[in-house]
Image: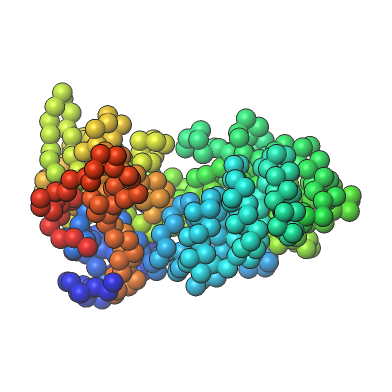
């Protein structure tokens, strides 16, 4: 769907380069050549907007940092699985890191070749293994003895060799914003201890239906210090050397993802320094490097737009009630995640107030920000929730029977609809009524506070 509404704004030299997504120009936040207020009015709110050029720039920067190595960028689909974004990444040469059959379906639908896909996750089912082997994926990152034994059984039934890597748990505890995002320590459900991993490799090496191909490690998410990665890499290379000494050669090392971005003024992950350390560590080794960036590529490339419904004063607090909620953006409620929230159109005359920005969902945990000092918006104003490109829409739900929002992609002077806003009928699609045919609304109901629909 191409833009047929208000055309792109002619901004000339005022528009910031794509290195900085969503600049404020003449008092209003923009994406490429478009005012965010125009996108909100045209497509409705809540709305996800992605800056495609910023995504492409981040990908190229990431790829270039590891240029001396044989690199497979396996984009982490769980960060944002929008099909249009995946298709763009495919055209850039990206592979995919997947954790479910659904993500495999998405990646293949976007054109990503099977030989550029790695399958992670602690609970792969028989059905998922069958699909992965039939598709011919590059590798399955195995996380337990039980999983490895089942994979061997499935591969024998299909008369194929399953390409495997063992996910090693190096017992590294990086600093992350939340305990849920630390996955490389001994008490995590992910991976296996090094001694157990060695035994699994030895066993796999005796099985004709298993092809020992690589080794995997993933220590967490939203990490801004490269040192834990260096620690994990050293532990994994020690395993590689030990296996080599036993006659088991590996083709690739998967160092995972989790590279942090700026949410609240924190330091961004030092990609260049990290890359230099990894290149030095792998110099002279015949190992392909697999990396799984997700948030690092798409986080800053997305915003969520929401419209203010009411401003309520109660109990000594000020509540800015918007049409965006935890069902569109779960990170603040689930992880205590911080997102910078700004008025789309600046108003320096508005007073500064300490507010809670909340949504309409019937939960006390439904908030986008708490005790946030901002210029007080008014009903009808649009707000931009920044750095929402990762773990935003992908964690959205229909809780409280709320249709999920639309997603649009902006590529310079062009805007493309990447996902239609869900309709009420979508909420009951697949359900089977038990007492006759369900009733229907006598008139269509609007689902957003904005007047126009996609």
Q: Does 217 appear above or below 345?
A: above
Extreme-right residue of the structure: 246
Q: Is residue 353 left or right of residue 184?
A: left
**Front position in the image: 83 or 18:** 83
- Is 297 situated above or below 144? below
Q: Where residue 35 sits: x, y (%)?
A: 22, 64
Above or below: residue 146 compared with residue 107: above
Q: Residue shown at 58%/68% (left/top)?
A: 113
Instruction: Provide residue 211's location: percent of width, then percent of height.
Output: 77, 56
Between 187 and 99, the one nearer to me in the picture: 99
In this view of the protein, can residue 276 be seen by the observer?
no
Q: Residue furthest top?
A: 315
> In this rendering, does residue 132 appear at all?
yes
Image quarter hosting the C terminus: bottom left
The structure residue drawn at horizontal position 10% and vertical position 50%, both measured from the top left corner, is 442
Whole-percent x and y of residue 415? 29, 70
Question: Would residue 207 be found to the left or right of residue 229 on screen?
Answer: right
- Residue 81 at x, y = what percent? 44, 57
Image position of 282 (left or right of 267): right
Q: Residue at image x 17%, y 48%?
A: 440
Q: Classify the position of the N terminus by image quarter.
A: bottom left
The answer to whether residue 376 is above or below residue 453 is above
Q: Quadrant of residue 197?
A: top right
């Amino acid at each position: 769907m191409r833009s047929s509404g208000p055309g792109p704004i002619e901004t000339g030299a005022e528009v910031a380069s794509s290195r900085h997504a969503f600049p404020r120009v003449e008092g209003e936040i923009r994406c490429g050549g478009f005012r965010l207020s125009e996108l909100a009015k045209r497509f409705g709110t809540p709305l996800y907007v992605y800056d495609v050029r910023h995504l492409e720039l981040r990908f190229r920067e990431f790829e270039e940092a590891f240029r001396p190595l044989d690199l497979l960028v396996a984009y982490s689909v769980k960060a944002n699985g929008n099909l249009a974004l995946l298709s763009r990444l495919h055209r850039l040469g990206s592979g995919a890191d997947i954790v479910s059959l659904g993500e495999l379906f998405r990646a293949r639908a976007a054109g990503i070749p099977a030989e550029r896909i790695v399958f992670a996750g602690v609970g792969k089912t028989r059905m998922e293994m069958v699909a992965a082997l039939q598709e011919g994926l590059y590798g399955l990152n195995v996380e337990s003895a039980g999983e490895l034994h089942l994979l061997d059984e499935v591969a024998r039934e299909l008369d194929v060799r399953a390409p495997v890597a063992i996910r090693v748990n190096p017992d590294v505890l990086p600093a992350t914003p939340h305990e849920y995002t630390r996955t490389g320590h001994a008490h995590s459900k992910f991976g296996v201890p090094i001694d157990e991993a060695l035994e699994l490799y030895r066993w796999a090496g005796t099985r004709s239906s298993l092809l020992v191909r690589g080794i995997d490690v993933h220590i967490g998410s939203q990490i801004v210090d490269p040192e834990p990665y260096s620690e994990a890499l050293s532990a994994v290379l020690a395993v590689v050397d030990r296996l080599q000494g036993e006659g088991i050669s590996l083709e690739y090392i998967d160092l995972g993802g989790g590279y942090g971005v700026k949410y609240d003024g924190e330091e961004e992950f030092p990609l260049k320094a990290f890359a230099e350390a990894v290149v030095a560590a792998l110099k002279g080794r015949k190992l392909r490097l697999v990396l799984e960036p997700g948030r690092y590529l798409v986080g800053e490339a997305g915003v969520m737009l929401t419209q203010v419904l009411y401003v309520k004063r109660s109990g000594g607090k000020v509540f800015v009630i918007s049409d965006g909620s935890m069902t569109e953006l779960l990170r603040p409620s689930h992880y205590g995640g911080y997102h910078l929230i700004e008025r789309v159109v600046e108003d320096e005359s508005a007073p500064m107030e300490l507010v809670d920005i909340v949504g309409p969902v019937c939960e006390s945990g439904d908030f986008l920000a708490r005790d946030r000092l901002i210029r007080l918006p008014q009903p009808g104003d649009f707000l931009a929730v920044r750095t929402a490109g990762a773990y935003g829409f992908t964690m959205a739900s229909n809780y409280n029977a709320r249709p999920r929002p639309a997603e649009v992609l902006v590529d310079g002077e062009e805007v493309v609809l990447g996902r239609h806003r869900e309709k009420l009928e979508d909420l009951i699609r697949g359900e089977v009524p038990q007492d006759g045919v369900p009733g229907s609304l006598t008139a269509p109901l609007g689902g957003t506070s904005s007047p126009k629909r996609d």
